[in-house]
């Protein structure tokens, strides 16, 4: 007997935002319970990190990787591992690590869409397209392009660093460095490392230095570097699309990778 194939309707998307001191978080999921798990993950892991840093101040202030004990809190070990891969201080991975661990908690809760944006760093696993806008200190580029993340890309992390707007300390000259990596902690630390490499008076040469640096970091899939009106790309990136005005009207999810301060 002929007939039209039945399809399962898309489940409703729930959103929640909250702040803990300097931590600003935006969560999306198809499961309400998963959002609660993400909030608890961020609050508890942030508390463990604060307590650890109080006893180990070197972890907070070091600009180089730091070895940590095997019995350290999991968030500390995740940050230390990312810092080692990117050759930066562990606090360069803090926002990405918290987002990553919260996203993983959502998946354990059965979420098909699990997205956590922490201060602009994104950890995501999704069964539907998610478009992530790219912000930059260069107004000709900022907010005009986005990455379309699909189920085949996930799970993954996206992070942006800049010498001109960022919470993180930067020694480079890039308008922005956006990194796509296997994990948000790696993306966060790598964005800082690559941004530091984009330096010097020769703009094109500095971008090339940053692209080479991106290729050296384990877990980095690709990077987009913007400086002085020039853009450099490397690696395997999700589809890059132009942002259009009608997206908010057709149900598209659009997340900024870095909020301007």
Image (cartoon, rainbow, N blue to C red):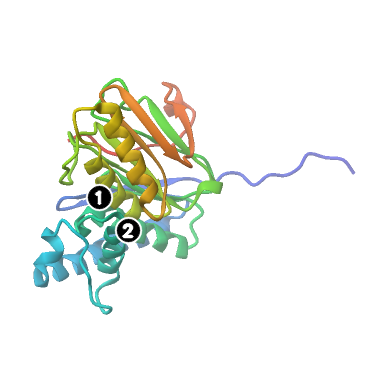
Q: Note whether residue 11 is visible.
A: no
Q: Secondary structure at mark 2?
A: helix
Q: Position of residue 116 (x, y in %)?
A: 36, 50
Q: Which quarter of the figure has residue 71? A: bottom left
Q: Note whether residue 181 is visible.
A: yes
- Which residue does the image show at 11% across and 65% down from the upper left? 58
Answer with left or right where residue 176 lies relative to residue 37: left
Which residue is the site of mark 2? 85
Front residue of 36 and 239: 239
Answer with left or right where residue 184 lies relative to residue 170: right
- Tell me the mark number nearer the camera, choosing from 2 and 1: 2
Q: Position of residue 171 (x, y in %)?
A: 16, 42
Mark 1 surroundings: few (<14), some (14-19) or many (≥20) residues within 10 A: few
- Which residue does the image show at 41% across and 21% down from the upper left? 245
Which residue is the site of mark 1? 18
Q: Secondary structure at mark 1?
A: strand
Front residue of 160 and 50: 160
Residue 107's disc is none
Q: CA distance from mark 2 to mark 1?
A: 30 Å
Answer with left or right where residue 171 lies relative to residue 94: left
| Quadrant of the frame with the C terminus | top left
Which of the two labelled residues, at mark 2 and mark 1, occupies the earlier sequence position? 1
- Which residue does the image show at 13% across and 60% down from the upper left? 62
| Quadrant of the frame with the N terminus | top right
Q: How many numbered marks does the figure carry? A: 2
């Amino acid at each position: 007997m002929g007939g039209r194939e039945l399809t399962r309707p898309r489940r409703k998307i729930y959103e929640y935002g909250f702040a803990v001191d300097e931590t600003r978080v935006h969560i999306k999921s198809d499961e309400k319970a998963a959002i609660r798990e993400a909030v608890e993950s961020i609050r508890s892991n942030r508390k463990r990190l604060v307590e650890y840093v109080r006893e180990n101040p070197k972890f907070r202030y070091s600009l180089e990787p730091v070895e940590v004990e095997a019995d350290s809190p999991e968030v500390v070990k995740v940050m230390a591992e990312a810092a080692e891969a990117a050759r930066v201080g562990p606090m360069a991975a803090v926002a990405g690590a918290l987002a990553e661990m919260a996203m993983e908690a959502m998946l354990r809760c059965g979420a098909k869409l699990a997205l956590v944006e922490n201060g602009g760093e994104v950890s995501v696993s999704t069964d539907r397209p998610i478009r992530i806008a790219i912000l930059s200190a260069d107004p000709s580029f900022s907010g005009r392009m986005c990455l379309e993340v699909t189920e085949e890309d996930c799970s993954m992390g996206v992070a942006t660093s800049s010498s001109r707007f960022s919470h993180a300390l930067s020694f480079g000259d890039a308008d922005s460095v956006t990194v796509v990596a296997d994990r948000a902690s790696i993306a966060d630390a790598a964005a800082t490392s690559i941004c530091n490499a984009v330096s010097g008076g020769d703009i094109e040469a500095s971008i090339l230095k940053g692209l080479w640096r991106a290729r050296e970091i384990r877990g980095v899939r690709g990077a987009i570097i913007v400086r002085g009106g020039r853009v450099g790309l490397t690696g395997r990136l999700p589809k890059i699309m132009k942002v259009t005005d009608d997206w908010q009207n057709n149900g598209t999810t659009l997340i900024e990778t870095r909020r301007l301060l």
